[in-house]
Amino acid sequence: RWFYLQQGIDLYHSATVESHSGKRVRTPKIGDIVAFHYGSASWSFHVGIYIGDGLMIHAPKHGHLTRVENISTFAGNYSTITYRSLIDTL
């Protein structure tokens, strides 16, 4: 949320709302939202920011430090991943 606020975009603090913001894209670019869902659920349990090479930056849960993590590893076998573009990137 802080990153996007620096870009002039005020996101509501909800993984589900953030995962429906902007436009859905198939191929993420740096700065796009990475959203995690269980199966075909319309709600999201977590979001991060794509930083390239299959990695994201995210805050895993309250009290944990923000960190870089492999998207596939975080998703595991039970998650569906979608990407949302909110800003124009190169």
Image (cartoon, grey):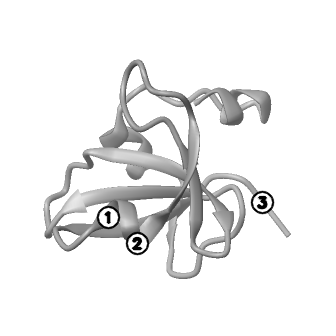
Q: Mark 3 points at which residue?
A: 88
Residue farthest to the top, as pictured:
63
Mark 2 secondary-structure assignment: helix
Residue visible at 57% across and 73% down? 54
Mark 3 secondary-structure assignment: loop
Measured as percent of width and height from the top left, residue 64 is found at 45, 26
For residue 48, side relative to residue 39 (left or right):
right
Labels 1 and 3: the sequence-earlier one: 1
Above/below status of 42 relative to 63: below
Residue 5's quadrant in the figure? Answer: top right
Q: Name the residue under label 1.
A: 75
Residue farthest to the right, as pictured:
90
Measured as percent of width and height from the top left, residue 26 is found at 50, 81
The quarter of the picture where the N terminus appears is top right
Residue visible at 48% across and 35% down? 59
Q: Name the residue under label 2.
A: 72
Badge 1: how crowded within 10 Å, few (<14), some, or many (20+)?
Answer: some
Q: Which amino acid does label 3 sit on?
A: Asp
Q: Which amino acid does label 1 sit on?
A: Ala
CA gap, disc 2 to disc 1?
A: 5 Å
Q: Which amino acid does label 2 sit on?
A: Ser
